[in-house]
Structure formats: structure tokens, C-alpha cells
Image: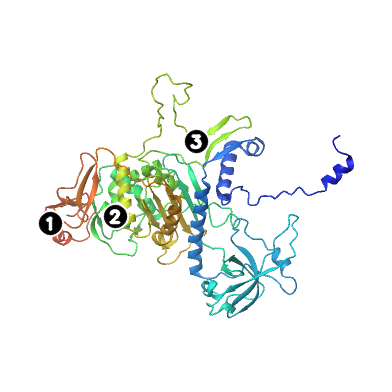
Amino acid sequence: GYVTKADGEEAKKQPLGVNPRRGGAHLFASDFFAEEVRRQIIQKYGDNALYEGGLSVRTSLDPRLQIAARKALQAGLLSYDERRGFHGPVKTIEIGGDWGEPLGAVAAFSDVPEWKLAVVLSVDAQGAEIGIQPEKEASGKIVAERVTGHISTKNMQWAYRSANGDRKSAKSPEGVFGAGDVVYVEPLPEKGEYRLRQPPKVQGGLVAMDPQTGRVLAMVGGFSYGQSEFNRATQAMRQPGSSFKPFVYAAALDNGYTPASVILDAPIEIVAGGQVWRPENYGGGSAGPSTLRLGIEKSRNLMTVRLANDMGMNLVAEYAERFGIYDKMPPLLAMSLGSGETTVLRMVSAYSVLANGGKQIKPSLIDRIQDRYGKTIFRHEDRTCDNCNAGDWQSQEEPVLTDNREQVLDPMTSYQITSMMEGVVLRGTAAGKIKLDRPVAGKTGTTNDEKDAWFVGYTPDMVAGLYLGFDNPAPLGRGATGGSLAVPIFNDFMTEAVKGTRPSKFVVPEGMSMVAVNRKTGMAAQEGEPDTIIEAFKPGTGPADTFSVIGGLDQYVPPEEILKNSPQANQAVTSGSNGLF
């Protein structure tokens, strides 16, 4: 009764002017995160509750960190992919008439707005003339305007190398593509100039987390959600490689070993199931007797296997399950080198326990869920505070937030392993590649045949971890290690993440002793001894009085040869467990 029938019918014919959202997420770069939240809600409450229950969901995502994580991972994937060469055009179309219509029909990534699809109109020795994919109106009709541009040789030279074995590398733009080829391009500041791009075949996942609460602050599950909805941060089961080693060492430090304990780094043979397993250090070679610290800083496989063998793999498996890395870990020695499969989210959660002093955490993307009436039906924060909601002040005690998290690792052990992983960043496999204005601890990981490259690291306030690898695991190439591929991405992300925050130090638990020890022997350093480091020891422990080695020797090595640079060369040398001297 408010309008006439004719006016109503006319109004219905008018467009609403609605801009439909694309990619399924309101917030830019949050597609993988939002989809994981959707899956978790369906798992908890079902489809009907999600789509018809009027739920209000508050997530833990930090938009600034999410954009930084996306940018860092994408840049790392593209850098690696372009070094391998050009995969070829997206497709080839006919451009005899209006090239805009067939180009407009090609689907582009919905979540990579920096890129545009383009068709090669002509190509010569100076570059290529391209036509940019036309925009579409709300009705889906392709606009009439046609925009052209240019790719100069300097902005496509990386593509001269072919990533496919069926053709040789090019020497000029004519050998890269031809007229009608559809490619991705990125606009440059110079008007009309574009850079050639291509979707990478290598993929990866990245997660950033608050180690105190388990709140997931950022999550990237691959290069583009539009390219693939598979979330490699939560769904990809990958071998963590050497990034698992800190948990072998944490188990050792929690059970009588110290950072100065000495293990033999030498060839070893393990016979199991009628077969002989001969693990090797990355790059081969061995360093002889070395401290636990050196073993983790230099990521020595042979030392890790000997340590796990000395402790027993049942103990290592117990710790791996306690940290949530695996649900059920087979107690096999190869598992000590990270040969099992887990996810980035699980690894970041486990490192968070090391970062927060040994407290168990539950990773969560959701802070709170309320129903349509405002009633809270889920809350991630389960700590309690009895006096926090007092109506008025009546001289009562200040409110105390009760931390009811389970202590799954000795805080002193947590500090010791953190200190050792600071050495990874300062002197080890990540040396010189992390440049933050604060302490950082972390561990690289490289699997057999360089199929996966990992790094998981943390400051006192944030943990971030990532891997790179092909969806169908294949070698990334010689030298494609966690240190060369994953660490620079971590550094790029964390550089942006810590901007505007005050640096803090890892807290040394009360009661620990700080003692100068010889880096090689692990024994107390004498005054003036050059190769020393300050090591943290628990009460009742300290540097060994005599030199002893964990693990057997295949051949006798004179003590003076091992200790020739140490004033303690004349100290007695005794048998360690399974040791020959």
C-alpha cells in the first residue's frame, strides 16, 4: 500500500548496485584463514548452525600480519619459481578479430589483484606488445575499452630459461612466446610497462602464532586461494626434516643431558629388518666428538641419531606426542631426523611451547562464538579470574588470572633449547640471514633429496613457521635448503611483523647457572681460552670434569688430536655410554 503496483514493478527492474564479494572472504588475503574457520565451525556445530544459526564469530586474525605473511610467502615462492625458468603461457587464443572477447573469457585469479591477464599481440627483439584483459560490468558484460601495454626484455629476461625439458632456453623474447599466448603480467610504475609473471608450481604454507595463548595471528595456505583451495598450512602432511630435531634435544635436556654433553659425530650403521641404514650429514663429512649445542647449530644428523639411540626412541616418541607434533609416532630411529609427516600448524604449536617456557597451548583461529541471542557458546581463552568482575572496590586483593595450562616441559629445559637455537640463527644453518633488532631462536629443516625446505623460529612474543615444496613431493634442487629458501621468507615476514614493537629478551629461569665452557669439549673453560661460550646449566649440573663421549667410535682417535686446541688436553678421557674412549 505504500507504492502503486506500476511503480513497484518499475522499481524491481532497476539494478540494486550490489558489488558481490569474490573469493569468499571479506578481508583481503584472508581466504585460507576464513575457509579454515568455516571448516572448524562445521566440524563443531554442523552446516545448519553455520549457515542458519545466526552465529557471530570473532577470529584471532591480525589483518596487518596476514597481509605481511601473504606478501613474504608469495615473494619467496615466485623468487624460487622464476629461477627455474618459464613454464609457458596460460593458454593460447585466436586474436584475428577482437582479442578482448576471448581474453575476457579466460578466468584469472580472484585473490591476486596485483596481476592481470594479458594476450601477446606481437613480439620482437625488444619485447612484446600485449593487450590487457578488459574489465567486466556488474552484468558480466565485457567493457568495450581495450588497453594495451608493453613488456620490455629486462622485465621478462628470467623467462629465457625454460622450466620444461621439451624446449631449449631462449635467447630473445621471440623464443619465449608468440602472438595469441595468454600470460600474467604485473603493472610497473612506468606508464604502459608491465613485468612478466607466472603462477608458481612450488607451493608452501606459513603460520604465525602468539606463543602465550595459541592464537593464530596469520595463516597462508599457498600462493593463491584462487589457484588452489588446498590449505598447505593445515592440510598438507609433510616431513619436517631437521626442524624436528629440537624436540629430540629437548627430550635429552629434560632427562639428564646438558647442552655441553658430547656426542660422536661420525659414520654409523643401523641394522633393522634385515637392512642396513647409513644416515649421513647434509653435505657429507663429520666433525668427531661435539657438544649438543654444536649438533643443533650445525644440524648434524649423525649426532642426532646417536643421541636418540642412546636415550631410546620410546622417550623421543613420548615427547613428540606430548608436543602434539604426531598423534602416534613409531619409535624408529629415522623418525629422529623428521622423517614422519605433520603440518605447519602443528610444528608452530610445538615451537610455541618452547617459546613460552614449556606451557601446553591449544592453537586456535577462533577467539569466541556467540549465538543469535548474544550468548557465548565457545571461548578459546579458558584461564579463570575469580575477582575480575567485582562490582565495586571493597579493599579486596587484586584480581589474579589463574594460568591452568599444563606444564609439559621444564622451563629450564625450554630456556636451554631456546639458547641453543639462538645459536642456529647466530652461527649455524641460518647464520647471517635473519636480521631483526631482537633475539631470535629457530631451526632449519631440509628433507631427503631437498623435497621440503623448512624454518620455524620465534622471538619471545611470536612464533612463525613455514615450508616450501611441490604438492607432489619432488626435489627442489641441490642447495635448496631451509636456510636458503625458508629463512629469508621468515625474515621478511618477521621484519614487518615486529615493526613498532619493543624488543624483549628470552627470560632465564631463576636458579640456572651460567658457565663458560669450551665449544668443542663441553668442559669448563680456563681463563684466556679463546673458543668458549656461556652455557646455561640446571641446579646440580655443570660442565663435565673429564672428557666423555656419547656414542661408539669406529676407530680410535687420540685425545690430543681432539683436544689439541684446548688447555684440557691432558685431562683424563673416559668412556661415555656406548663409547670406546
Q: Disc number at residue 380? A: 3
Amino acid type, residue under disc 3 in the picture: His
Q: Which residue occupies the foreground of this view, 326 or 187?
A: 187
Instruction: Give the Cα distance between marks 3 and 1.
Output: 56 Å
Residue drawn at x 39%, y 20% is: 395
Q: Indicate the secondary structure of the residue bearing disc 3.
A: loop
Amino acid type, residue under disc 2 in the picture: Gly
**Badge 3 density bin: few <14, some 14–19, many ≥20, Cα 10 Å:** some
Side of 336 relative to 475 (left or right): left
Front: mark 3 or 2: 3
- The picture places residue 464, in percent across and down from the top left corner, at 43, 50
Which quarter of the figure has residue 209? top left
Q: Indicate the secondary structure of the residue bearing disc 1.
A: helix
Amino acid type, residue under disc 1 in the picture: Pro
Q: Indicate the secondary structure of the residue bearing disc 2.
A: helix
Instruction: Give the Cα distance between marks 3 and 2.
Output: 38 Å
Q: Which residue occupies the foreground of this view, 475 or 123?
A: 123
Front: mark 2 or 1: 1
Lower position in the chain sequence, tag 2 or tag 1: 2
- The picture places residue 23, in percent across and down from the top left corner, at 63, 52
- The picture places residue 126, in percent across and down from the top left corner, at 58, 79
Q: Disc number at residue 567? A: 1
Instruction: Give the Cα distance between marks 2 and 1.
Output: 22 Å
**Badge 2 density bin: few <14, some 14–19, many ≥20, Cα 10 Å:** many
Q: Is residue 312 visible?
A: no
Residue drawn at x 50%, y 60% is: 75
Q: Disc number at residue 295? A: 2
Residue drawn at x 29%, y 64% is: 285
